[in-house]
């Protein structure tokens, strides 16, 4: 997913940007060196585990909290909303990175993101020029990549054990979901609606991956987040409609052209938590489980 844009369809797609592990991180000896390569290919070196961390992306923040590092997070983006504690943390980025504020907080580590590179490259460089360690987190596009990211952040922060526990838990959740998916009698056809103007999620998106994992079949075979044709939705006649924006059920139900779609006739329209289905972090499998609960209904 790309960096944040305005609150129209594009912002909704960007937002479609943790299982809480509350254990404290294990202390890292001051003599132990940390060296991890980031998304730019640079090797980031730390003399000890960071204790003042700034996260520029909600997915990074969720990962940090899942590793038990919530107390070490001193700055987040204006879009952070999970866990609830993030609302009280200093905001250092909205549309643009506030480099002056970040520098004033004197962090040991700033977690950037690969999806921000094109728009925030200069800000990253300003932070580096000020002597601040910036680690650019790779842009995960699937569950496997997300687990790799969690392990990488664990290595960077001296919480390898906790990172392994989180990814193991995710794999256990995945196995449970896969088992239940095999028990489904059918694989219902599903339409995913991201916005009222019929943007949807196709192949290569977390939403599609979680839907298929849960046992559903996406009526969209194209890739990415795309605008879709209304006539094609009607023709495909989905049995279930999943939406990720407020009041979607009432909006969809009132479309006269959709009255004969099975999902509409049978009241099978569900509003889902977009963040669970799009942020590359520990809660993705919760999103898949939520979808599966709908499929089993």
Image: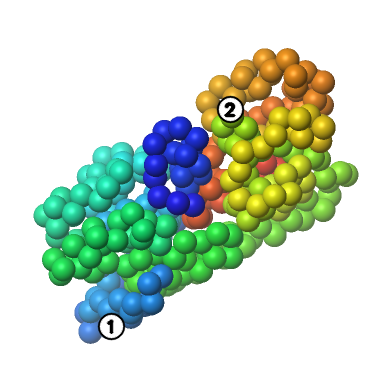
Horizontal side of 64 relative to 268 (left or right) equals left
Q: Secondary structure at mark 1?
A: loop
Q: Secondary structure at mark 2?
A: loop
Q: Using the image, determine if residue 125 lies above or below residue 94.
A: below
The residue wearing badge 2 is 196
Residue at image coords 41%, 33%? 7
* Residue 105 seen anywhere in this rendered image of the structure: no
Mark positioned earlier in the residue sequence (1 or 2): 1
Horizontal side of 152 relative to 195 (left or right) equals left
Tell us which disc is closer to us: 1 or 2.
2
Query: Of residues 119 and 184, which is closer to you in this image?
Result: 119
Quarter placement of the C terminus: top right
The residue wearing badge 1 is 33
Residue at image coords 30%, 43%? 94
Image quadrant in which you'd find residue 31 = bottom left
Query: Of residues 119 and 280, which is closer to you in this image?
Result: 119
Residue at image coords 25%, 51%? 97
Q: Residue 86 at x, y = what percent? A: 32, 44
Instruction: Find the distance from the CA under tag 1 to the CA under tag 2.
Output: 51 Å
Query: Of residues 231 and 108, which is closer to you in this image?
Result: 231
Q: Using the image, determine if residue 16 lies above or below residue 7.
A: below
Horizontal side of 190 relative to 57 (left or right) equals right
Q: Residue 117 at x, y = what percent? A: 36, 60
Task: Tell me the tag on residue 16.
Answer: none
């Amino acid at each position: 997913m790309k960096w944040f844009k305005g609150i129209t369809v594009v912002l909704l797609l960007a937002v479609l940007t943790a299982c809480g592990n509350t254990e404290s991180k294990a202390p890292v000896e001051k003599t132990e060196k940390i060296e991890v390569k980031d998304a730019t290919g640079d090797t980031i070196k730390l003399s000890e585990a960071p204790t003042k961390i700034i996260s520029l992306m909600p997915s990074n923040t969720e990962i940090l909290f899942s590793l038990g590092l919530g107390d070490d997070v001193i700055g987040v983006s204006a879009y952070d909303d999970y866990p609830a504690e993030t609302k009280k943390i200093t905001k250092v980025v909205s549309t643009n990175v506030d480099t002056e504020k970040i520098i004033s907080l004197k962090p040991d580590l700033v977690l950037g993101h690969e999806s921000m590179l094109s728009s925030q490259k200069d800000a990253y460089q300003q932070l580096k020029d000020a002597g601040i360690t910036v680690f650019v987190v790779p842009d995960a596009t699937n569950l496997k990549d997300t687990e790799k990211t969690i392990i990488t952040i664990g290595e960077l922060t001296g919480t390898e054990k906790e990172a392994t526990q989180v990814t193991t838990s995710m794999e256990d959740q995945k196995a449970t979901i896969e088992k239940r998916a095999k028990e489904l009698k059918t694989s219902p056809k599903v339409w995913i609606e991201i916005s009222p103007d019929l943007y949807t999620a196709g192949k290569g998106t977390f939403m599609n991956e979680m839907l298929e994992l849960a046992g559903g079949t996406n009526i969209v075979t194209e890739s990415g987040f795309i605008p879709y044709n209304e006539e094609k939705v009607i023709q495909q006649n989905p049995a279930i409609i999943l939406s990720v924006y407020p009041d979607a059920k009432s909006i969809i139900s009132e479309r006269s052209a959709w009255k004969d779609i099975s999902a509409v006739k049978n009241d099978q329209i569900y509003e889902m938590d977009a963040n669970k289905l799009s942020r590359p972090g520990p809660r993705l499998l919760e999103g898949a489980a939520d979808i599966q609960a709908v499929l089993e209904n």
